[in-house]
Each structure stands twice: as C-alpha cells, then as structure tokens.
Image (cartoon, rainbow, N blue to C red):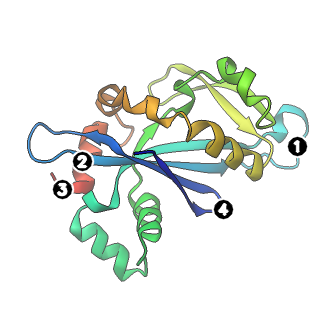
Amino acid sequence: MMQTVKDISDSILYVENPQWQCSFGHGQPVKLGLVLEAVDLGRSGKSGEDSFSFVIDAYLIPQPEYLDEELLEEAKSEGALTREEQIRYVYECDGGVPVNIDALQPAKASCGFSSFVADSSISSVKSQSGEEIEVRHFQDLEEAMLFARDFYAAYAHVLIGFIDVVLDSSLRAGGTGWDKIRQMVKK
C-alpha cells in the first residue's frame, strides 16, 4: 500500500505508510508517521540569503491508533475529534522524535531535482549533536510546503530503512527516540 500525505494545517503535513513501524522486541510493532512542519525563523523582510527564512522541521510520531489512550483522551477533551486534529494536538503538545530530513539526501545533492520544485537556499548549521549539517531554507511558506510535499514526503520511505539509527539517537531532552516513542504509546 502507498503512503498517504495529509494537510494538517497551512504549515504542517503528515505522512504515513502502513509499513512504517518500529518494534520493541515484544508485543505488536508500533506504526509510525512523519510530521513535516514549515517553520519561519523570523528573518522575513531581509534581502539576499537572509530572506530565506523558512525551514522544514521533521518529527516521527506513532500513528494515532498506537498512541497512549490517556494522550488520545486528552486530545479529545481539548476538541481534537478527527484523526487529523488528534495528530496535530499530539504533535504540538508532545512533539516527537526529531529527524534531520535533509540527511535523506543532502541538500546540495538534491539540487538537480529540487531546482524545478522550489526556490531555496542551503546553509550549514550545527545539529543537536554538534555536527555540521546542511539545511535547506525557503523564501516563503508556499515554497516550503510545496517542497515538503513533492520531495521530503516522496522520499520519506528512505528514512524507515534507517529507523533503528534514527531512534537510537540521543534527544536534547534526554533519552533516545525509542524512549520518546515508548512514552507516547506507553509500552
């Protein structure tokens, strides 16, 4: 079955595939989804490279059917009744496992395809772990979301091939991606 891409808001996409999952070694595997959010770094109004103020943040979260019942009940009590509203509520309140989405294919390596898709700028930044990574910046929300849908969502399946590496990574808040997923599903 193919992956599905849903608009959660003007700046958030949710991507899932029934085959995307992780396993804790016991019980049923937990199916995962990917949240792609266009974030404005607040550099609007500047010129040149600085005018590219949008980046895409990416996070893995459990698919709604695998979330902890208390978390889902909390979402429902706050008015999140549809599946999409629950995804947004959980993501905005509880976050997820951060993913360097440009690591799927380094930003500079994807330029051949992406130059037809979005006007963007590439710069190096320090990651949570202190290593230098390339990050793609977009001039506006529309360009960022177009690229998120046409490129990041289309290549998200590559990420699942490295799911153990992604979930083994340490998180800034402490623990690993495994710990964060386990907390969200109460496994």
Upstream in sequence: badge 4 or badge 1: 4
The alpha-carbon separation of the residues under discs 1 and 2 comes to 44 Å
Q: Residue furthest front?
A: 1
Q: Residue 155: x and y, percent?
A: 53, 33
Give the left or right position of residue 163, taking residue 182 as reference.
right
**Residue type beneath disc 2:** Val
The alpha-carbon separation of the residues under discs 3 and 2 comes to 11 Å
User: Which residue lies under the disc numbered 2?
Assistant: 30
Mark whose residue sits in front, 1 or 3 = 3
**Residue type beneath disc 4:** Asp
**Residue type beneath disc 3:** Lys
Upstream in sequence: badge 1 or badge 2: 2
**Foreground residue, 95 or 15?**
15
The alpha-carbon separation of the residues under discs 4 and 2 comes to 28 Å
The alpha-carbon separation of the residues under discs 4 and 1 comes to 23 Å
Place residue 22 in its image quadrant: top left
At x 79%, y 39%, the residue is: 52
Is the residue 26 above or below the residue 116 in the image?
A: below
Upstream in sequence: badge 4 or badge 2: 4
Q: Are marks 1 and 2 in contact (CB under 8 Å)?
A: no
Name the secondary structure under disc 1. loop
Upstream in sequence: badge 1 or badge 3: 1
Upstream in sequence: badge 3 or badge 2: 2
Upstream in sequence: badge 4 or badge 3: 4
The alpha-carbon separation of the residues under discs 4 and 3 comes to 30 Å
Give the left or right position of residue 65, taking residue 118 as reference.
left
Place residue 9 in its image quadrant: bottom right
Mark whose residue sits in front, 1 or 2 = 2
User: Which residue lies under the disc numbered 3?
Assistant: 186
User: Which residue lies under the disc numbered 4?
Assistant: 10
Q: Residues within 10 Å of mark 3 (few under 14, many from 20)?
A: some
